[in-house]
Image (spheres, rainbow, N blue to C red):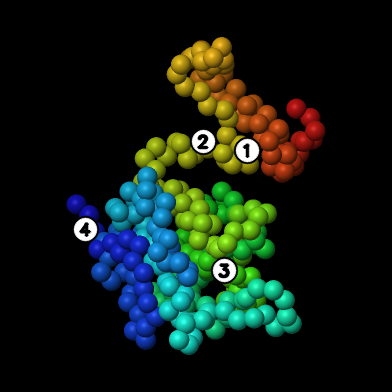
Amino acid sequence: MTKLLKSHGSRSISASTKPRSLMEESYLKKDAWIAKVITLFPETFPGVLGSSLVGKALHEGLWGIETIDLRKFGEGRHRNVDDTPYGGGAGMIIRADIVGAALEQASIGTPSNQQEWPIIYLSPKGKLFSQSRALRLAKGAGVTLICGRFEGIDQRLIEHYDIEEVSFGDFILTGGEIAAQALIDATVRLIPTVVGNQMSIVEESFKDGLLEHSHYTKTALWKDLAVPDVLLSGNHAKIKSWRRKEAEKLTKQKRPDLWRAYSEKRNKNPDED
């Protein structure tokens, strides 16, 4: 029987000259994937991450989350973390020295190689998050996430720490916490043993750059709409071929950007069937 280390669950840590190690007092399994989240709202975690298969895996110590309260590093009576932008303009900017102090604490006990443990800032200016990026993250040891607020963080912080900026789409959220939870969920579910049926991961959307084929279940006839005959045929070769063609058709219809990339990789004309 595998002996587990004590799990911290969604424990928050506070600023201290003697910070507590993430692996102390935890029930995490050996080599568990870890997410460290720098946020002004640590109480929002684990949030939805504490539910379903991802939540079950969290409680079993397959992965762990540690929140780092940015407010603890603030200055003055009100623990201010932001200030007005140089050059004028609306809004406030989170200071580099404040986030820098939080990052220094977050780095304790983590690999220095950012391929193994990247620092990611959830930002609308970042590269669009993808399934392939989630897979690369899942193969690493963990990630440190910075949840922005206001007008964002000081650019010097991004340059100094070589922070990767990641976006979840062309829209603006009030902060990075929701995006951080989405990133963690997309990554954790790719860790072996988190999702019981690994084939459900292998065959899902974005495999080979395509959307997933359509799905059907009982009953065979609903509101005069029938399940495609091929799925009832029992011919697995024909079913596999139909699903592939269905995935290609849906991708071309719904995501022409993905279809173009898929076609280019195969030297196909994206305008042809």
Place of residue 48 in the rendered image (x, y in percent of width and height, measured from the top left) = 42, 51
From the viewer's side, name the closer residue of 234 and 216.
216
Amino acid tagged 4: Lys
- How many C-alpha atoms fall within 10 Å of the one at disc 3: few (<14), some, or many (≥20)? many
The residues bearing labels 1 and 2 have C-alpha atoms spaced at a distance of: 10 Å
Please tell me whether mark 4 sits on a helix, a strand or a loop: loop
Q: Which element type, helix, strand or loop, lies under badge 3?
A: loop
Decide if residue 266 is in sight here. Answer: no
Cα separation between marks 2 and 4: 33 Å
Could you tell which of marks 3 and 2 lies nearer the N-terminus?
3
Give, as a three-letter code, the residue at label 2.
Glu
Circle 1 crowding by C-alpha within 10 Å: few under 14, some 14–19, many from 20: many
Residue that label 4 marks: 3
**In the image, what residue type sits under mark 3?**
Arg
Task: Give the mark nearest the N terminus, 4 or 3.
Answer: 4
Identified at 57% across, 34% down, the residue is: 212
Amino acid at dot 1:
Leu
For image coordinates 43% across by 61% down, the residue present is 44
Q: Which mark is residue 210?
A: 1
Relative to residue 157, is residue 185 depicted above or below? above
